Amino acid sequence: MAFIRKNLLNGLFIILLLVIVLVPDAKAFLIKGLMEIGFFKARVETPVASGMNLSGIRFKDAKGNQVDLGDLKGKVIFLNFWATWCPPCRAEMPSVNKLYKQFKADKNVVFIFADADGDLAKSNRFMADRKYELPVYRVESEVPEQIFSGSLPTTVIFDKQGRLALHHEGAADYADKKIVDFLNKLSHSN
């Protein structure tokens, strides 16, 4: 009897592991839970002394509106690279959406959520199905490797002078008070 119980528990454990590994929503749920207890925090940095030349780094939304990061000088830019199939991306989306809702009326902060696959119909459907309000774009130009090297999710925040203020690869809790305070500080600085 003990042998059967032990095998049953081992079998259930293996099934649980397979579900977490093979089902993106299950893995996202696990990561989201870990974020809520304090794991996966983005590190807020002091902006580097000189700004980057962001001109020519372009994104386009589903309506055909194009955004050039160089045209956004004087605004804080929150740039997130993600994909619908990426479990860590899915895990951080609720916190990113919460942060977006807090700042969407702030004219000093611009949010760009770049779908790494470039499939705007699919990514907009994903956002609508989950009731997220995040503005989705696709990359329309070369993106320097110091901004995005291919790791998903990647979040980059530039201050008003175009200086890199945060660069984080992997999931993070962007609704965290430190991030909210950091964006407020960048938004209200000169």
Image (spheres, rainbow, N blue to C red):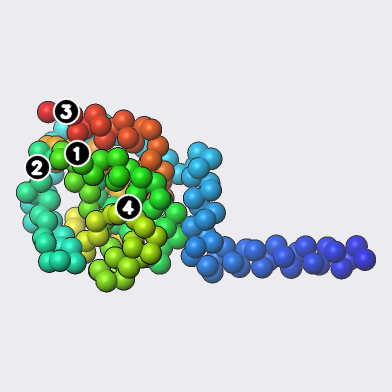
Whichever of callouts 1 and 3 sits on the residue coming sooner in the sequence is: 1
Q: Can you tell which quarter of the image residue 103 is in?
A: top left
Residue 13 in the image: above or below residue 75: below
In three-dimensional space, the C-alpha distance between marks 4 and 2, rounded to whole angstroms, equals 21 Å
**Residue at which label 2 appears:** 73
Q: Front-most of 111 and 154? A: 111
Within 10 Å of disc 1 (Cα), the crowding (few <14, some 14-19, many 20+) is some
Q: Image height check: is 127 above or below 31?
A: below
Q: Secondary structure at mark 2?
A: loop
**Residue at (33, 43) in percent of width and height:** 99
User: Which residue position is annotated with label 3?
Assistant: 189
Q: Earlier in the sequence, mark 4 or mark 2?
A: 2
Packing grade of label 3 (10 A; few <14, some 14-19, many >=20) is few
For the residue pair 51 and 42, the one nearer the viewer reads as 42
Q: Nearer the viewer, mark 1 or mark 3?
A: 1
**Disc 2 crowd, CA 10 A, few/some/many (<14, 14-19, 20+):** many
Residue type at mark 3?
Answer: Ser
Question: Residue at point 30% right, 49% down?
Answer: 155
Q: Quadrant of residue 104?
A: top left
